[in-house]
Image: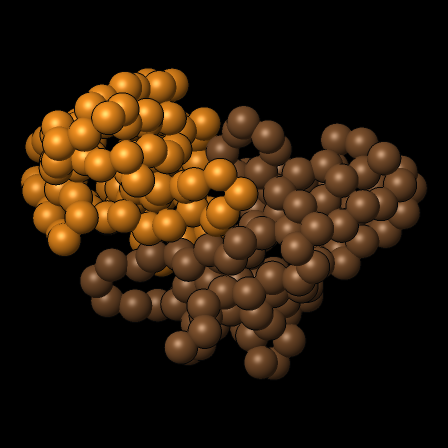
Chain colours: A orange, B brown
Amino acid sequence: LAKTTQPISMDSYEGQEVNITCSHNNIATNDYITWYQQFPSQGPRFIIQGYKTKVTNEVASLFIPADRKSSTLSLPRVSLSDTAVYYCLVGDRTNAGKSTFGDGTTLTVKP
Amino acid sequence: DAGVTQSPTHLIKTRGQQVTLRCSPKSGHDTVSWYQQALGQGPQFIFQYYEEEERQRGNFPDRFSGHQFPNYSSELNVNALLLGDSALYLCASSLAVRAGVNEQFFGPGTRLTVL
């Protein structure tokens, strides 16, 4: 399983764009990159998934360079409610349960 | 459309006891995965069930076992509980084969405390 490395914590202010980078040097050819958000005492919630280049949905963008050894989750104009732990996962898309969660990045959004 | 549900919400056991946790997947999903999340850490994959069989397993001892029923619901059993088994146990459901994005839907978890 590809190991991921993320910053332990990040601070931001309301209205700013936040970029969280994840390193995954040993990513395999079949691996996808998936990001989850988790609030205290809740299960993780899917944010976005991608394989290469750029993926955008209604809540975030995911940037993946050509070598796929890292990825960046971009959250536009964060609010206080975006304060949470963000996890980067790398794994085979068809084996959803086999992807490995790291310790995540704790994002704190301040007013 | 019901999401993933888990029961019970909280559970307190003593060392050496056995526990059974239950999970109902999101409607239409056929795959259930179980995770253990210790305080301050990311979820750790225990195992995954599909077609009533264990398909994948993480680095957990045989004290951890599971079952999937024909209606896709699942149980996680832990025998001979240790203090270190205290954690939030998460169930996640997904579709085994799907074109496009393959996301897992997580339940709220069961908080297990072993005394």
Residue B104 image-quadrant placement:
bottom left
Q: Is residue A111 above or below residue B110?
A: above
| Closer to the camera in the image, A110 or A90 | A110
B59 relative to A91 in the view: left or right: right
Q: Residue at x 20, y 24 (%)?
A: A13
Residue A88 image-quadrant placement:
top left
- Furthest toward the front, the residue is A111
Q: Position of residue A94 (x, y in %)?
A: 36, 58
A60 relative to A22 in the view: left or right: left
Q: Is residue B52 above or below residue B56?
A: below
Residue A18 image-quadrant placement:
top left
Q: Position of residue A104 (x, y in %)?
A: 40, 29
Q: Is residue B38 above or below residue B35?
A: above
Q: Position of residue B37 (x, y in %)?
A: 58, 38
Q: Is residue A17 visible?
A: yes
Quadrant of the rendering where the C terminus of chain A is positioned: top left
Q: Is residue B65 visible?
A: no
A2 relative to B112 in the view: left or right: left
- Furthest toward the bottom, the residue is B70
| Closer to the camera in the image, A60 or A2 | A60
Q: Residue at x 45, y 27 (%)?
A: A103
Q: Residue at x 41, y 41 (%)?
A: A38
Q: Residue at x 54, y 27 (%)?
A: B40
Q: Is residue B67 above or below residue A39?
A: below
